[in-house]
Image (cartoon, grey):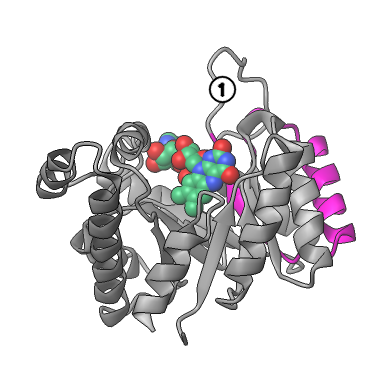
Amino acid sequence: MNTNISIEFFPPQTPEGVEKLRATRAELAKLKPEFFSVTYGAGGSTRERTFAIVREIASEGFDAAPHLSCIGSTRESIREILAEFKATGVHRIVALRGDLPSGMAETGEFRYANELVEFIRAETGSHFSIEVAAYPEWHPQARSPKDDLEAFARKVKAGANSAITQYFYNADAYFHFVDEARALGVDIPIVPGIMPIVGFTKLARFSDACGADLPRWMRKKFESFGDDSDSIRAFGLDLVTELCERLLKGGAPGLHFYSMNQSALTSEICRRLS
Ligand code: FAD
């Protein structure tokens, strides 16, 4: 497949999970992704586990892109992390604000992701390629679509090289977002985030929380399958493959897969696309 793809993992909590992720990664490596990214719990809750997976990926010879969230962090702690990334051979970071876990007090020195991007550039020059998040259906806390778009443009102005979107199932929302960003002078690649559909109930709950819209026709159809997991899987695969085809045909510069640490669906979608 000629399309540029990247693949996201979360750091497993158990040694069995780490072992399983090795097998998943070996399978997904066959797709020749541009990089594997690894999420980071806001407030530093997964710091060691994220680093451990990043080190493994880098030692296997792949481009590893740790996510780094700044909310609740001090400049000094981010400086230390950047030094550790550099020492590990990391050249790409997904720079985020993050969401503080409930109950954690806001005591950090960063408020928004553009401040983190600025800080990384000030501290490390052009060492890192910086990815930032984009929201075609708007971030749930955004005061307005206009404010959100301007916040996105600020991250780009601060030095982001590329963007990865929140997942979505409305291709038009992505195309509209890209047009509006271009009209504001944003010229970096905006790569759609793709969420393969494993099960519907969990996806619906998660989508409500992160502000991704599940269109009514899609909800109704999934609900009609009840707990028939084969039908859910088959319909989900068709739907996401068609979405990817439409995005690529419409000019999307690549695809970023939220793998959920599983290889089967991402591999199957890429097989169908090629
Ligand atoms: P920002 O770009 O800072 O935006 C956050 C909100 O603040 C938006 O509503 C924006 O409109 C608003 N805003 C920005 N600047 C200003 C300003 N100056 N004044 C007022 N409002 C402003 N979370 C994790 O915890 N770990 C991860 O690893 C992780 N990975 C992710 C990867 C991707 C590709 C995506 C899309 C999201 C990821 N998230 C992750 C979730 C992300 O942390 C949350 O969506 C978070 O709420 C926002 O982070 P951000 O970097 O987009 O924030």
| Magenta-drawn segment | 70-98
Q: Is residue 136 above or below residue 90?
A: above
Q: Is residue 90 magenta?
A: yes
- Indicate the position of residue 68 as horizontal and vertical percent values: 66, 46
The answer to whether residue 175 is left or right of residue 43 is left
Label 1 Cα neighbours within 10 Å, binned few <14 / some 14-19 / many ≥20: few
Where, by quadrant of the figure, is residue 254 drawn?
bottom left
Q: Position of residue 212 (x, y in %)?
A: 30, 44
**Residue 204 shows up from this direction:** yes
Q: Quadrant where the C terminus lies?
A: bottom left
Q: Quadrant of residue 24?
A: bottom right
Task: Please report the residue visible at 29 percent of the width from the left and 41 percent of the height from the top.
Answer: 200
Residue underneath mark 1: 101
Q: How many marks?
A: 1
Q: Residue at x 30, y 34 (%)?
A: 201
Q: Nearer the viewer, residue 172 or 82?
A: 172
Instruction: Name the residue at the top extreme.
Output: 103
Asked if 243 appears above or below 208 in the picture, the reply is below
Estimate the x, y position of residue 189 in percent, counting from the top left. 45, 72
Q: Position of residue 165 (x, y in %)?
A: 41, 56
Instruction: Give the vertical position of 213 relative to 190 (above or below).
Output: above
For the residue labelled by badge 1, is the local secondary structure a helix, a strand or a loop? loop
Residue shown at 73% from the left, 71% from the top: 62
Find the residue positioned furthest to the bottom: 2
Q: Is residue 32 left or right of residue 64?
A: left
Q: Amino acid at mark 1?
A: Pro
